[in-house]
Amino acid sequence: LPKEIQEFIPGTSFQSQGDNSPQLFDIKMDDRPLEEQEAILVLSRIEEVFKQYEGSGVKKKVAAALDLDKDGKSDNLNYKITTVYNKYPHLFSAFPKISSAYKKYITNNISENKFGK
């Protein structure tokens, strides 16, 4: 298990705040299944790296920073994010940078109601 999960203290929460959002998202971790907690931690790491980059090619830069690039492409990052989104689309409101970078994918899947939510 990731170190964050091993050291997790029940009753704590994860908080993410978008750069342009006055709203503070509070995700209670202790009421969630372990797999969903791991997804939150993965997304929080990715979100933090997205905050460091702007402009064109940001996905490639983030993928490289997270060692998820393949032949200079962000395929592994895309796969990781879409895999989490397929299982936990409700989490993405707490990750504005990821949601913005993948808005076309997320918007298309929500409008097509592919996930039954």
Image (tube, rainbow, N blue to C red):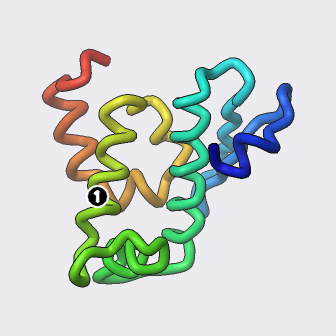
For the N terminus, give its image quadrant. Answer: top right
Q: Report if residue 22 is visible in the image.
A: no
Q: Which quadrant: the C terminus?
A: top left
Viewer-proximal residue among 58 and 32: 32
Residue 22 percent location from the top left of the image: 67, 50
Q: Residue at x 74, y 24 (%)?
A: 30
Residue 31, horizontal then vertical, whole percent: 69, 18
Farthest-out residue, front? 1
Q: Amino acid at mark 1?
A: Asn
- Mark 1, other Cα within 10 Å: few <14 / some 14–19 / many ≥20: some
* Residue 63: quarter of image: bottom left
Image position, residue 48 (x, y; %) = 59, 65
Count of numbered labels shown in the rendering: 1
Q: Quadrant of residue 58?
A: bottom left
Residue at (55% x, 78% y) in the render? 52
Q: Residue at x 25, y 23 (%)?
A: 115
Q: Work out whether 107 lies above or below 21.
A: above
Is residue 81 depicted above or below 30 in this figure? Answer: below
Could you say where residue 50 lies in the image, as x and y percent from the top left?
A: 49, 69
Residue at left offset 23%, top offset 65%: 75
**Residue found at the very far left of the displayed protein:** 112
Task: Say which residue label 1 marks.
Answer: 78
Query: Compared with residue 6, is residue 86 higher up or lower down, i.e. above or below?
Result: above
Mark 1, secondary structure of its residue? helix
Tell which of 74 and 1 is nearer to you.
1
Q: Nearer the viewer, residue 102 or 29?
A: 29
Residue 34 located left or right of residue 43: right
Quadrant position of residue 59: bottom left
Q: Is residue 76 left or right of residue 64?
A: left
- Residue 60: in sight, yes or no? yes
